[in-house]
Image: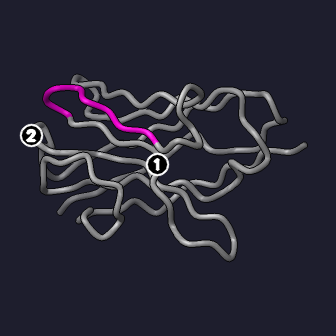
């Protein structure tokens, strides 16, 4: 059974940093894509970043480009999201997701597995 477990969320002031981690278990995603999405209250779930595990190719939403970095740790089987220069509009529940495909897609419908989410709150 595939499990994705996020950690690292919390409360931070604007301009600060947080690092989210997603631990994957139950199967290997070495040929696939893992991503991060977020959902703010009253809004749809939106794409943040994705990484193709085997080649390290990445894709970012324009709103986080230059501030967030997605990476994977083969030894720990985790995917991390380093978030710098955080803004109040980054406040949301952040979800880790995994796809059976190989494309760096931004649609949540193309991801097959989801974590429970971790809250990130950025105060002004």
Q: Are marks 1 and 2 in contact (CB under 8 Å)?
A: no
User: Which residue is at a point 64% across and 32% down the rendered structure image?
Assistant: 18
Query: Is residue 55 highlighted in magenta?
Result: yes
Seen as rendered, the residue at the extreme left is 31
Please state if 111 lies on the left or on the right of 96 as rendered: left
User: Mark 1 falls on what kind of element?
Assistant: strand
* Residue farthest to the bottom, as pictured: 42
Question: Residue drawn 25% across and 33% down?
Answer: 77
Residue 89: % across, % down: 74, 51
Query: Residue 54: percent from the left, percent from the top?
Result: 13, 30
Indicate which disc residue 31 carries. Answer: 2
Q: CA distance from mark 1 to mark 2?
A: 21 Å
Based on the displayed image, in which of its 4 quarters is residue 64 positioned?
top right
Give the percent coordinates (x, y) of residue 76: 28, 28
Query: In the rendered image of this protein, does residue 41 appear above or below residue 76?
Result: below
Neighbour class for label 1 at 10 Å: few (<14), some, many (≥20)?
A: many
Residue found farthest to the right? 124
Q: In terms of depth relative to the viewer, which is nearer, 49 or 22?
A: 49
In magenta, the rendered stretch is: 53-60
Give the quadrant of the N terminus.
bottom left
- Please check the rendered image and state whether residue 49 is part of the magenta-colored stretch, yes or no: no
Position of the C terminus by quadrant: top right
**In front of the other: 72 or 63:** 63
Q: How many marks?
A: 2
70 lies above or below 41 = above
- Using the image, tell me which numbered label, if any, was put on residue 81: none
> Which sits earlier in the primary sequence, circle 1 or circle 2?
1
Q: Nearer the viewer, mark 1 or mark 2?
A: 2
Left or right of 77? Residue 10 is right
Indicate left or right for 113 with 46 as reference.
left
The residue that disc 1 covers is 6
């Amino acid at each position: 059974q595939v499990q994705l477990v996020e950690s690292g969320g919390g409360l931070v002031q604007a301009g600060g940093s947080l690092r989210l981690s997603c631990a994957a278990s139950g199967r290997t995603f070495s040929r696939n894509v893992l991503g991060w999405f977020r959902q703010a209250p009253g809004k749809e779930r939106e794409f943040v970043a994705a990484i193709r595990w085997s080649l390290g190719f990445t894709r970012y939403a324009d709103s986080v480009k230059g501030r967030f970095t997605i990476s994977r740790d083969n030894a720990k089987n985790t995917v991390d999201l380093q978030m710098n220069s955080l803004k109040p509009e980054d406040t949301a529940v952040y979800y880790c997701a995994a796809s059976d495909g190989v494309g760096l897609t931004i649609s949540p419908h193309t991801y097959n597995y989801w974590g429970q989410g971790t809250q990130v709150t950025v105060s002004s």
